[in-house]
Amino acid sequence: MVVSVAGRLDAVSTPDFEKRLLEFVDRGNTMVVIDGGRLNYISSAGLRSILCIAKRLKQGNGILSVAALTGVAKNVFEISGFNAILPIYETVENALEQK
């Protein structure tokens, strides 16, 4: 499943994002790619949410990947060390090829 995220993933938008993705995971989806190509900003709340979703997937032998990050969002993932925790790909197509 590919999930496209646009705009901001912050304290306001994160609860809905996390709820929806966890619903998909709970329905049995085990491979999720977050398309961050249109993600302009991500806060610590957004990072925590992604980590929570990744952990839930891992419990079911699934995996969360992130793809197409640019600008500030890409910098936040790198500075926070998330690029060492999650697979991050240059494009969604690259991420899907790894499945």
Image (spheres, rainbow, N blue to C red):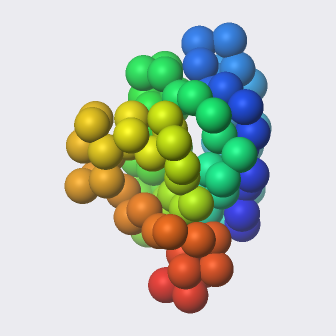
- Relative horizontal placement of residue 45, taking residue 19 as reference (left or right): left
- Relative horizontal placement of residue 81, taking residue 60 as reference (left or right): left
At horizontal 55% and vertical 80% (from top left) the residue drawn is 94
- Relative horizontal placement of residue 60, taking residue 18 as reference (left or right): left
At horizontal 50% and vertical 69% (from top left) the residue drawn is 90
At horizontal 54% and vertical 49% (from top left) the residue drawn is 70
- Relative horizontal placement of residue 53, taking residue 87 as reference (left or right): right
Q: Is residue 10 above or below residue 96?
A: above
53 and 13: which one is in front? Answer: 13
Q: Is residue 28 above or below residue 73?
A: below
* Quadrant in the picture for the N terminus: bottom right
* Position of residue 8 measured from the top left corner of the image (x, y, whole percent): 67, 26
Q: Residue furthest top?
A: 12
Residue 62 visible within the image = no
* Position of residue 44 measured from the top left corner of the image (x, y, whole percent): 42, 21
* Position of residue 51 measured from the top left corner of the image (x, y, whole percent): 42, 40
Q: Which residue lies furthest to the bottom in this view?
A: 97
Residue 41 visible within the image = yes
Q: Is residue 82 above or below residue 88?
A: above
* Position of residue 76 measured from the top left corner of the image (x, y, whole percent): 39, 35
At horizontal 49% and vertical 84% (from top left) the residue drawn is 98
How many numbered marks appear? 0
Q: In which quarter of the image is residue 17?
A: top right
64 and 96: which one is in front? Answer: 96
72 and 21: which one is in front? Answer: 72
